Structure formats: C-alpha cells, structure tokens
Amino acid sequence: MVTNIDMENKNSNPKNYGKILKGLLGYIKPEWPMFSLAFLLVVVGNILGLLGPRLSGEAIDAISGGKGNVDFQVTISKALLMLGAYVSSAFLSYLMVRLVVRISQRVIVQMRQDTFNKIVELPLSYIDSHQAGDLVSRISYDLDVVNQTLTHDLIQISASLITVVGALIMMFSISVELSLVFLILVPATVIFTVYRIKKTRPLFSARSKKLGELNGYVEEILIGQKTIQAYEKEEYFSEQFRIRNEDSIDAYYKADYQGSFNGPSVTLITNLSLALVAMFGALLFLQGNFTIGYLASFILYSRRFSGPINEIAAIFAELQSALSAANRVLNLLEQPSEKLDKESAHVLSDVKGKVEFRNVSFSYVEGIPIIKNFNLKVNPGSLTAIVGPTGAGKTTIINLLMRFYDPQEGEILIDGHSSLDVTRKSLRRSFAMVLQDTWLFKGTIRDNIAYGRPEASLDDIKRVARAAHIDEFIESLPEGYDSIIDDDASNLSQGQKQLLTIARAMLLDAPMLILDEATSNVDSRTEIAIQDAMNKLIEGRTSFVIAHRLSTIRNADNILLIQNGQVEEQGTHEELLNRNGAYAQLYRAQFS
Amino acid sequence: MAGTILEVVLPAILAFIVDDIIPTENKNRIIIWGLIMALFSFGAWILNVVANRMASRTSSLTIQNIRQDLFERSMGLSARQIDNISVSSLEARMTSDTYVIHRFLGATLRMGIRSVMLFLGGVLFCFYLSWRLALILVVLVVPLGIVIRYVFSRVIRLFNDVQKKLDDMVQVIRENIRGIRVSKALDKTEYEKERYLESNKAVAQAEIKATDQMAIMSPMVNTILFTGLAAVIILGAYLSNKGLILTGTIMAFLSYFIQITNSLMGLNRMFNIYNRAMASSSRIEEILTMPKDDNQVIEEVLELPKADKNIPEVEFRNVSFSYLGKSNNISNISFKVYPGQTLGIMGPTGSGKSTIIRLLLRQYDVSAGEILIRGINIKKLKRSDINKMFGIVFQNDFIYRATVRENIDFGRNLSDEEINTATIHAQAMEFVGEKEGGLDFELSSKGVNLSGGQKQRLLLSRALAAKPEILILDDSSSALDFKTDAKLRQAIKENFSNTTSFIIAQRVSSVSHAEQILVLESGKMIALGSHKELLESCEPYREIASLQLGDSKEDKKGKEVAYGN
C-alpha cells in the first residue's frame, strides 16, 4: 500500500513550462472579461501616471523664466492637472485592486474546489499511500502561492510592462539615437534572464517538495505527541525534526541564493544604460543636435524604467516558485480518478443479497498477493463470518466488496451481476458498513448519525440512537442531538464514537451489511445491550462480519477461516469443530 | 545597504554631469564620469547580490530557529493544551504561518531595507537641495501617519479572521481524507464537495474583505503625496519668482520627491505582507509563550524510592477528575496495586478506563484526591522518574513513517538483542520476519500497511522493550486472535513477573489472571476483586464472563452473540 509515493515526484521537474501555463490559463479564461477590465484600468491608470512627469515638466517650463518672470497661472494649472492625473491614477489602481482580488478569489475558489474534488474522487489506493499533510499542503499553500502570482503578479507585470512601453515611446519621441543607445543592453538582459530561469527552476521545485515533506512529518508526529511525552522522547523527535527542517530550509535557501542574482542584475543593466545615456547624451549635446531640456526629460523617463523592470525581475522569482507549486497541484489533478462506471453499468436495485466471489485474486502491491483465487457463495439473508489471523486479508475482502479496490483477476457477483457492471453508487448504497476505525466529522451529533440519510426525521434518529444505546448519553449533553462533535471528536470516548457509527449504519436500512470489527471498541456489557439492535440489523440482510471473538460468531451460517489469502476452512461452527482443523484449534486457544 | 547608497548617488552624478561638466565641453571628462557611473553600477550590483544573499540567509536561519522552537514547544505542551489548540491548528502554525513569516522576512530584508534607504536618501537630498521645499515633507508626515494607523488597526483583525477561516477549511480536508471510505460508501462525495465549497468560499470572503480594507491605503497615501508634489511646484514657483531657488534645483527636487514616493509605495506593498506576517507571528507567539500547564509543575521534588513489596507500587486515593471542569468523568476511585501485581480494568465505553491511565501518567492532574507511586504523590516526582517506570500502549497508539526497528526503538538506542527479545515477547517476530527486510521494513504513516493486530503487536514490542517496571496496556490486544493473545499473556507472565501491570481490556480472558480487577461504570467503581470474587459478587461481570467464555446457557441466546467480536 505504501509504494509509489515518489512516482509523481519524478515528473515534478517537467520540461514543459507550456503545459503548466496552459493548465493555469484554463482557470483564468472564464474570468477574461473581468480581467480585461482590470487590464483596462491598469492601462488608463498608467497612462495618467505617465502624463505626470510631462505635466510637471511643463509646469517647470513655466517657472524657468526665473526671478520675477514666473507664469503663476500656467504653473498652478499644470500642477493641479498633474495632481489630478496622479490622483485619478491612484484611484483607478484602487479599483483595480478591488477588482483583482475578486477575480483572484474566484479563480482560487475554483482551483481549491477542483483539487478537493479530485482528492475525494481519487481511488483509495492513492489516499492510502499518501500523507494527508502533503495533500493538505497542496490545497492550502501551493495554491496560495499560485494564486498570488496568477492574478496579482500578472496584473503587476502588465502594469509594469505598460509603464516601460509608455516610457519607451516617450523616449523615442525625444531622441531615436539615444533610445537605441539605451536599448543596447536589452538583448543581454533577455539572454541573462532565460539562462537564470533555466538554472533556478529545479531549485524551486525542490523547495516546494521539501516543504510538503516537512508538513507531512509535522502532522504525523503531532498526532503522537502524547505518546512521545509518555516515553519522554521529545528531544529525539525534535532532533529528527531538525534534520527535516534543515533540509527544507536548505532547499529554500538554495532557491533564494540563485534568485538573489536576478533583481540586482536587472538594476545593473538599467544603471549601465543610464551611464551610457549620460555619456552619449552629453556628447550629442556637444555636437549641438540636442537641447539640455530634452536630455533632462529623456533621463526622467529612462529613470521610470528601472522600477518596473526590477518589479518584473522580483516577480520572476515568485513566478518560478508559483510554477513549481502549480505543477504539484496539476500533478494531483492529473491523477486518474476512480475509474468511471462502465457506460453500460446499470443501477443495482431491489437487491436480494446473493453474493459470489469467483476466482478472485488481488494484491495491493504487485507481486505480493493478498488474496489468491478466492471463491465464495453467499445466500441472501445469510450471515458470513470471516475469521483468521490478523493480516490474513479479511479487511481486503471488504475493500473488494465495496469496490474500494478492484481485483486483478476474477469477479464479484451481486445477485448475479458482476460488480463491475453496476454503478458504484448503487453498489455501495446497498451496503451498510461499520468499520473499526470510526469516523465522525465536525458537526452536530444529529448530522453525524443522519450522514447517510440526511432526510431522516429526528424521530428516526432518536430511534436508532436508542437502539444503539447511545441515546442516554446524547440526551445528557446540554445541547442534546445538536451538540457539536469537535475536532477529532476528542470529547467522545472510542466506544461512544463507535456507537454513533453503529446508529448511523442502522439508519441506512441497506439490504447488505458489513461489520469490520464493529464492536471492537465497545465493551462487552454495552455489546450485550445493543445485541438486540444488532440482531435486528443483521436479520434478513446479507451480512459480512469480521471478528476474532469466536464466541460471537458461532451462529453464523457460514464461517470462513482465512489464512494466507486462502479460505482454509469453511462451514458452520459445528462442522468446523467436528473437522478438528485450524478453526477448532483457534477456538480452543480461547480457553487456554 | 552600501549598494543602495551607490545607487542613490548615481542620479547625483548624472546631475553633476549635466549641470557642471557639459558646460565645460570637455569630452574626456564626460567619458571619465560616465565610466565612473558604470563603475558605481557594478559596485552596486555586487553589493546588492551579497546583501540579498545575506538577507535570505538571515531569514532562512531565523525561520529554521522559529520552526524548531515551535516544534519543541509543541512537543512539550500538556495534553490539555493540545486538546484546546487542536492538532490541525498547531500544524498550521508550524507550516503555513512560518512560511508566511519567511516570505515576509525575505522581502523585508531585501526590498524593505532598500526602500527605506531610498526613502532616507531621497529625504536627505531634498533637504540638501532646499530646506524650504523640504518643509512640505514634514507637513505631510502627520496625515500619512494617521492614514497608516487607521488602516492598520482594522486590517490586522481581518487577516486574523482569514487565518481562522483557513484553519476551518483545512479541517474539512483533513476529515475527508480520513473518512474517505465512509463518504464513498454512503455516496456522500457530492455532499462533501458542497460542504467544502462553503468553507472554501468563506476563506475567499474573508480574504476579499481584508484586501479591500488594505487597498484603501494606496490611493490615500498617493493623494497625500502628490498633493505634496503639487505644493512643491507651486511653492517652488513662488520661491523662484522671488529668486530664492533655481529651476534646476526644483527639477532635481522633483526627481528625489518621486524617488521618495516610489519607496513609500514599495513599503506599502511590504505592509501587505506585513499584515499577514503579524497575524501569523501572533499565532506562533501564542504557542511559544504558552506557560507550563499546572500539571507540568513539580511541587517539591522527592527522590523516587526503590520498589518495596510492602508499599503499594501505585495507589489511587479517592481520585476524581473532570476533563472540562464540569461533571466528573471519574469520581472517587481508590485502589492499591503492589509490586508485581496486575490490575485489570473493565467497564463500558466512556466509563473512564483510559482516564485512569492518563491521570496515572500525569497527563492531566486530578481534580480531587491523590495518586501515589511508592507512597509518594506523583505531583512531587520528577517527570522523567515517572516516565522511566512505564511501558505503555495507548488505544490506537502512534506509529510513524520509519522502519519497524525505529518504531520499536523509539529513539532509545536499544541494542539489537533488546529489540529482538521485545519483539519475540510481543508475538511480533512472526509477522515482522515475513515482511520484506524484517525489522528494516518501512512502515507508512499511521502504520496503514499493517493490519490492526500487527500494529498492536508492534506497539507492544515498543512498550516491552523498555523493560518497564509498570506496564500499561490500554485495550492493546483487542485485535489479536485468541491464540496470539494467550501466547502474549504467557510471555508476559514468564518474562515480566516483577512488572506491575495495568490492563484495560474488553475480554475477560485478558484480565482473568489479574490479582485485582476494577470494574467501572460511568466513572464510578462498582467492584474491585479477583476474577473468582467478581464472578460471585459482581453481576455485570458475571454476565460478561459467561457470554465471552461461554457456558451451556449460551446456546439459547442463539444469534444474539453472532456478530462482531
């Protein structure tokens, strides 16, 4: 079950940036009208911003008469116009931010939802072999990083680009030669940037991956905190943590170390350009085909260059971590979901409860078979008990019955239909199931019991709670059935949790029943107390019961003793005892 | 920092070229000064790269330490504190909160300091150029301060809210991963998607609210600054008209004023991250500064004496306890267990069996009464003294992703022999031997690649490997088949005869050999005695025993007993 954790990490360094971008653009696409609007706001805002220097220049022209010759009227009107331009530009960018956050939140809600939907649709083999913490980290902050970049940075880049282009146009209108001199270093910038990106990308992937691993570890260890304290091994685990922490920080720093080149390098190139412009501008001026005023504005515009370009460079670093993060999410989204039902699959209805396993073989990990050539016929309404040493494959049979996993060979028939030919939904709904590992979610007790049948009336819920002998406890709570079960249901005992899940199964009223160590956490007295209800639950239903307490299963219609993936013995309690084989041995061991 | 200074000087050199050198018409000097500019640029480049690296090194090291401290503090939190905070919230603090701060630190050290330098440089040059015009800057400080304070006070709260909503969302994900079998079985996938959508949207709403509030900052600050700029021009015009200032100076002033504005905008962007970082850091601080819980305080340390067969190894005197401080979860529990004896604990679910163990380990402190180990109140014993005595298996205990050996060793540096012996006694050798690599078989998180019985035997190996003086088994053989369970009991009897044991079990056969069996119901003791005594005197116990161990009457009950366990 643990194998291929690394399978998908292998292709976490994809050559194809294009694929990632395509995946991401798919999410932005529906938002394009809003995006265009935001873009428009940015364009107008920036043009207004670019007008600023020009207007201030004109105001200064009006001042330049010197002592006693200042044209106040022009100066003031130009200054106010400039103020107007800047303020409206700022206001537009305010609107832009509000708009963008709405777009970006819509996009991320969609992405998070898709990721979550994928998680709940994944085949169990995937979930069983991955740490929850890793999956959580993909939704929580891989997506956060992606979203930041995708929306906010994207707009920022466009804004910067527009500023740059606008400034360029202004510069060309002032002097073509000087602009060309200024741009001489552009190809160098481009080559440099491409080189850097190539070099740093794998580092950013490694950084995301390490962080995911660290999170997985933290989650795992925190759950065991009480045990660790009891063994007084806090320091040992802190040391273990230190190694992983260091690894993750190291990966982070390595990416940062390489990324630290980018910003200053771009600044260097613009600064060098500035020096070039100063020299050539001065020389041009000396040749007489240039005025000092032109040089001044040219330099003012060229100074507008470095800011945005720096921003772009900074964003590039972000962009890289965003792409690696996106890659992790997209990888998850690409995982095949549980196989779709066959097109010809029909709804399993009116289930009688005849079940047959035909030559079923199954293994979780290739080459390590759990069940080999397994055959079993179960009559409607009968009780099948599955016993055997732990690890013999008892729970696997349940996994196959419920189609959490599909067998590699053979088939399972329900009422004569191959389980592959009916819809999963109808197949699963025909079973009620109580597992050893109880599961409750944060919500009211009522919602937890009615989980499988939300339309059930409160009376029905109370009825099953009474049958499961948990009603008294529930009513003793201040909020009764509306009491909230909190995080990890830590306010309930194991047994109480189990009784709630039994009540949940009772409410389902399904034609078939699976009890996988269903009462292992319920004490014997409570077990006796709820027997009546359990009997009613079993009666008339095809039931599969996994148990190890032989005393409780001796009345099964059919007892399967499973050992080494095979049905070793099969029959009623008496038959098996008379055979004096493995079952009889096991039974006697109970009284030793 | 030095790099930024070099950069700030660049425009000044430029101005120098334009104002002073061009009029001299000396081409060589122009080229020389141009080259000096280039030189400065390179200087700035090198210094900036170095500064960036130092910045990311510093922030990385800082985060590494914060995370380490946080982890260590988390390991030391009391059970009650963990209950209150919840594991998922603790995890979020350790992962996403530290990540937010990491990004913030990196950005501050890189851009923030740069912005501040550009700002200060700009201000300095402004004053240098014209103190009269620079006074406008001083006037602007007041409204700027007010705006920033106002926005901040509101925004921090909103970002806290975002984080809370995120916690809730993560919990839904977590629940779903854990309960995937149930939701698939009950065809609740669509419902769960809906449920997630709600929490998903709640995060987005909170995020939008916070961002909206934050966004007000930029236009307000801009308006103030550019009003200042207009004022500079107009005042400049006035001063120029009086002949108090040159046009060129106004131009230079404007250039630096723009630089100030840009650096403030840069800082503003930083504040965006700052808000998140503050919310995160207060969540981290809450954990780091959490005081020792009451049950972690040792009143006056006493030496733990050696075991004495005349003094009870463990004694409960009228112990009562309540998790929530309301109604008692257990009340008035008293018993004595002498060295080498076994106490079996039985009782319905929720009757307080595990609570007794939690109290004995001092994971929680008793509300009333006292617990004595070798005659000394456990509140006066060093924690390490207590812990060293015990070998424990909790219900559904902790297995982590590592080898079988590491899980048994549990950081205690046990010898191969000790591990092997423990594994044999715990009846785990057989299945471990079948695994690929034996003791070096890699377990996955929570031991999902083991069956329930295998997990229990692994945990038993861990507990036995310490050669404990007191062994505590909380429902830790429930998944074993009877044969293995019997073998286990035999092994413990033979090899741990001096060990005092507490065994919580559902099966009578697991405790019937105990000197004393404590029967609980709703937190109260209803009986205490040996198997034999209880069979005679305790009706509930007799019922269970007859059912489980089977007697002739049982056949009448027919199918009643014919389900799980």
Image (spheres, rainbow, N blue to C red):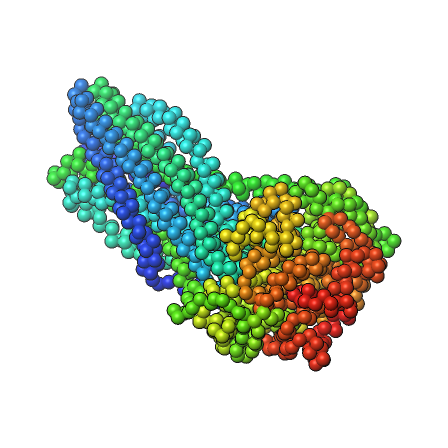
**Residue A369 lies in quadrant:** bottom right
Point out residue B305 in the picture as x, y percentages from the top left corner.
82, 51
Q: Nearer the viewer, residue A538 or B91?
A: A538
Vertical placement of residue B244 versus A344, above or below: above
- Horizontal and vertical percent for residue B207? 42, 42
Task: Judge left or right: residue A157 versus residue B446.
Answer: left
In the displayed structure, A27 sits above or below B147; it is below
Residue nearest the observer in this picture, A317 or A266: A317
What residue is shown at x 28% (from left), y 49% (from top)?
A32
At which x and y percent is residue B513?
Answer: 80, 63
| Residue projecting furthest to the bottom | A579
State the image quarter where residue A295 is shown: top left
Question: In this rendering, does residue A261 appear at all?
Answer: no
Residue at 57% from the left image edge and 65% from the top image edge: A513
Report the residue that reaches farthest toward the right: B310
User: From this viewpoint, is residue A449 visible?
Assistant: yes
Q: Residue at x 62, y 62 (%)?
A: A536
Residue B307: % across, % down: 83, 54
Is residue B529 left or right of B456 when viewed as pictured?
A: right
Residue at image coords 25%, 36%: A49
For the C terminus of chain A, give its image quadrant. Answer: bottom right
Q: Is residue A494 above or below residue A103?
A: below
Q: What is the count of numbered marks?
A: 0
Q: Residue A252 or B346: which is nearer the viewer?
A: B346
